[in-house]
């Protein structure tokens, strides 16, 4: 009996020693170089269960639900709330040997969002700007296109372009912020009445909007089904690879800048594996390759050799100073404001579905 028990115990211990280590990651769609992910699994022996999402609301729902992820990628405007709700772990940067490769300016920006630099490290960043296809849009518009959100937000200009296809993002806070900024207002300062009014105006224009999504519009831009759209820079540049006629611009009135960061949820089952993966992504060449694959901006320090190489390879992935001056961060909303924005957006989406 003792011999049998010892054999069973040794067998169980051997099974544990060879048990597969699994890291669960939840990231934005098309937001990593596949070979970087594959190389991490080969080199570490860790299997990555890699799932993706398309909206910030998807991530909010996942963090509030039953599935437990070890690594997530929230946007900067979510961070203060997620930290207040104790949904993220504070990071020990001593466990990240490549932390020093990050751009100090990005880290300083994150510090302004509820000291978020203590909880996250920047992964990729970019802007929400305007993408157009002049070949299609100029004949419909009747001349050269202004570098302005008026192409989407002015009723008369939008009406001229509706036939060749205009699109907005399924991003409530970003869209309302840009709508109000175009009118010289601030989303976070106007109160719920201003939000309600902006929501009604956005609802009224939906009959002229062909796309309201964060995924399909990339193919529609590339195939010529849209001539003007609000777009994340990486998506616009991805579409432009297939359709060189496309142009991405930072409008004169300004555009949003965002930082998406790597974070470990408070209830993560394997934070140790998350640290290993975070540091792997921070290795300068991997960070460069992820920027090239996603078409978003790298988090590396501007004077690093990898960033200089990236500027030579793809200059569009290194925004110039004039463009940076026209960028602003999405405002932080109170819980009441966010609830109002989300509620209005659901009305807009429901109206589109019913129509």
Image (cartoon, rainbow, N blue to C red):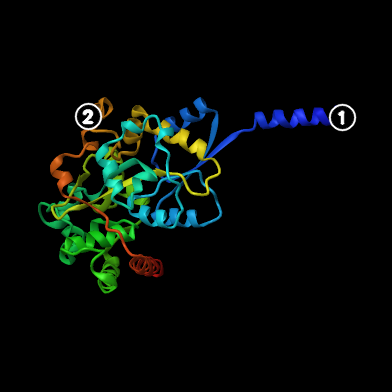
Q: Nearer the viewer, residue 205 or 101?
A: 101
Q: Is residue 164 above or below residue 31?
A: below
Residue at 21 percent of width and 45 percent of height: 248
Horizontal and vertical percent position of residue 75: 35, 50
Can the viewer see residue 34 in this picture? no
- Towards the viewer: 163 or 119: 119
User: Which of 61 and 200 lies nearest the eye of the viewer?
Assistant: 61
Q: SS at mark 1?
A: helix
Against 142, residue 93 (above or below) is: above
Q: Earlier in the sequence, mark 2 or mark 1?
A: 1
Task: Return the residue found at the far bottom.
Answer: 193
Question: Left or right: 183 with respect to 173?
Answer: left
Q: Which mark is residue 2?
A: 1
Q: Residues within 10 Å of mark 2 (few under 14, many from 20)?
A: few
Would residue 118 be seen by someone viewing this image from the given angle?
yes
Left or right: residue 57 versus residue 246 is right
Residue 325 on image: x %, y %: 15, 47
Classify mark 2: helix, strand or loop: loop
């Amino acid at each position: 009996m003792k011999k049998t028990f010892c054999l069973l115990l040794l067998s169980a211990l051997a099974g544990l020693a060879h048990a597969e280590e699994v890291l669960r990651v939840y990231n934005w769609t098309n937001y990593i170089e596949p070979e970087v992910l594959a190389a991490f699994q080969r080199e570490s022996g860790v299997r990555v269960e890699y799932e993706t999402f398309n909206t910030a609301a998807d991530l909010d729902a996942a963090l509030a639900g039953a599935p437990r992820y070890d690594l997530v990628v929230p946007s900067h405007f979510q961070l203060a709330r997620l930290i207040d709700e104790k949904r993220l772990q504070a990071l020990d940067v001593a466990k990240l040997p490549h932390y020093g490769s990050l751009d100090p300016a990005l880290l300083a920006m994150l510090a302004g969002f509820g000291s978020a630099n203590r909880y996250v490290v920047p992964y990729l960043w970019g802007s929400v700007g305007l993408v157009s296809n002049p070949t299609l849009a100029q004949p419909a518009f009747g001349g050269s296109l202004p570098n302005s959100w008026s192409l989407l937000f002015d009723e008369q200009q939008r009406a001229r372009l509706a036939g060749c296809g205009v699109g907005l993002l399924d991003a409530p806070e970003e869209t309302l912020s840009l709508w109000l900024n175009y009118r010289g207002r601030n989303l976070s300062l106007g109160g719920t009445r201003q939000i309600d009014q902006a929501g009604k105006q956005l609802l009224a224009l939906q009959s002229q909007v062909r796309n309201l999504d964060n995924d399909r519009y990339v193919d529609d831009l590339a195939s010529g089904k849209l001539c003007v759209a609000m777009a994340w820079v990486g998506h616009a540049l991805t579409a432009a690879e297939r359709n060189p006629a496309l142009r991405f611009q930072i409008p004169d009135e300004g555009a949003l800048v965002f930082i998406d960061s790597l974070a470990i949820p408070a209830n993560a089952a394997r934070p140790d594996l998350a640290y290993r993966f975070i540091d792997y992504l921070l290795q300068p060449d991997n960070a460069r390759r992820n920027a090239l694959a996603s078409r978003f901006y790298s988090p590396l320090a501007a004077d690093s050799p990898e960033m200089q190489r990236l500027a030579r390879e793809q200059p569009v992935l290194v925004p110039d100073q004039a463009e940076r001056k026209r960028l602003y961060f999405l405002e932080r909303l109170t819980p009441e404001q966010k609830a109002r924005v989300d509620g209005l957006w659901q009305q807009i989406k429901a109206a589109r579905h019913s129509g």
